Amino acid sequence: ILLFSTLGIFVLSSSADLITLFLGLELMVMPAYILTGFHKTDRFSNEGGLKYFLLGSFASAILLFGIAWTYGLTGSTVFTEIAEVFAGGLMNGAVLVAIGFLTVGATFKAAAVPFHFWTPDAYQGAPTPVVAFMASATKVAGFAALLRVFEMAFPLYRDDWRPLVWIL
């Protein structure tokens, strides 16, 4: 199970497309849901796994909405093609909304403030090695994905997203 999550991290960090990024992200967190609720007889493990799964599902929906919003603005999910469309000077509130949805979805998966409210329950219920993996590898992968999307797809909007990333 841990190897599937690691494979998801590799797919996530090497993606050049929003769809591949989403598949890598889900391949990373689906095994983490299972590992969080690994102790079937422990109610804290069950509670943590369930909360992580439910809130992760909402975060996936928000991320997918950001992907759909970006596709609707650009007609593509490939990072370089998105950057080419935005290089033409497309700047309006819709672009900032797309950046916002992508940020919220990715930062929830990375458990960054203020989207970290699921972590105490998940970390309390999960086995210690799983907590160590989730607290380090998934956070690094989430921020790597966020920076990869922003740097490759939204390079002209650095002034808009850099302060947001610094705050997170």
Image (cartoon, rainbow, N blue to C red):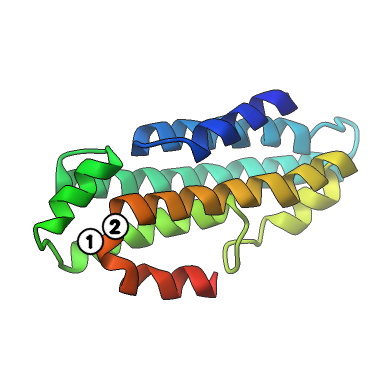
Q: Residue extending furthest left?
A: 88
Residue 135 vertical placement versus 20 (above, below): below
Front position among marks 1 and 2: 2
Badge count: 2
**Residue at x 15% of width, y 40% of height:** 75
Side (left or right) of 37 relative to 33: right
Residue bearing the label numbered 1:
95
**N-term-proximal mark, 1 vs 2:** 1
Answer few, some or many: residues within 10 Å of disc 2's Cα (few below 14, many 20 plus, some between 14 and 19). Answer: many
Residue at 22% from the left image edge and 47% from the top image edge: 82
> Quick one: SS at disc 1?
helix
**Mark 2, residue position:** 154
Type of the residue with mark 2: Phe
Residue 108, x across and y down, in percent: 55, 55
Q: CA distance from mark 1 to mark 2?
A: 9 Å
Q: Horizontally, is 86 left or right of 14 in the view? A: left
Name the residue nearer the viewer: 21 or 65: 21
Marks 1/2 in contact by CB < 8 Å: the verdict is: yes
- Residue type at numbered disc 1: Val
The structure residue drawn at horizontal position 59% and vertical position 46%, both measured from the top left corner, is 141
Quarter of the picture containing the N terminus is: top right
